Image: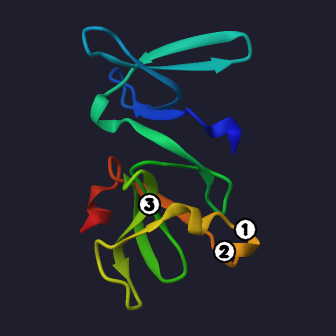
Amino acid sequence: MDELRGIWRGKRTKNGEWVEGFYFETPVGESYIMTSRQETKFVFKVIPQTLGECTGLRDKNGKPIFEGDICKDENSTYLIVWHMHQWQCKVIHSDCVLALDCSFPLWQWDNCKENGYRTLEIIGNIHDNPEMLE
């Protein structure tokens, strides 16, 4: 989990491709993400509205979960948000009694024994799949 701390994701302004790395902002308000591959560092200007921080957890397929991701478990679909000083899963669709728009702490899905090995799967994000929010 520590390797995911401080990692951000955003879409490049040049071609709309996603990049992950360390986020910084210039004094004039431009947003950038710096990535590293071996000894080389790359800096990409990103669209500020697409920025999302990594939660530090991975989905059931090993993909890092970012703010703005849309995930599902056995019964429901969730939007990953930062709320009440913690990462949360906001219900956007449910086949059980969960109320829409209620939220649960993301740590409840961290796939540990204490949480019943609950897992999430990323199925999209709010930037590439806004129709999933409807």
Q: Given the image, on which type of amino acid does mark 2 rest?
A: Asn
Q: Quadrant of residue 90?
A: bottom left
Q: Looking at numbered disc 3 in the image, what kind of residue is underneath it?
A: Gln
Q: Quadrant of the C terminus?
A: bottom left
From the viewer's side, name the closer residue of 121 and 104.
104
Say whether disc 3 or disc 1 marks the residue closer to the N-terminus.
3
The residue under label 2 is 115
CA–CA distance in space, label 3 to label 2:
15 Å
Horizontal arrangement in the rendering, residue 109 relative to residue 71 (left or right): right
Q: How many neighbours does mark 1 have within 10 angstroms: few (below 14), some (14-19), or many (20 or more)?
A: few
Q: Secondary structure at mark 2?
A: helix
On screen, residue 42 above or below 52: above
User: In front: 12, or 30?
Assistant: 30
CA gap, disc 2 and disc 1: 5 Å
Q: Residue at x 47, y 35 (%)?
A: 9
Q: Label 1: which residue?
A: 112
Name the N-terminal-most of marks 3 and 2.
3
Is there a contact, CB below 8 Å, between mark 2 and mark 1? yes
Answer with left or right where residue 36 lies relative to residue 131. right
Q: Which mark is residue 88?
A: 3
Looking at the image, residue 52 lies above or below residue 124: above
User: How far, Cα to Cα, is label 3 from label 1?
Assistant: 17 Å
Residue at (46, 39) in percent of width and height:
53
**Residue 131 versus residue 72 in the image, above or below:** above
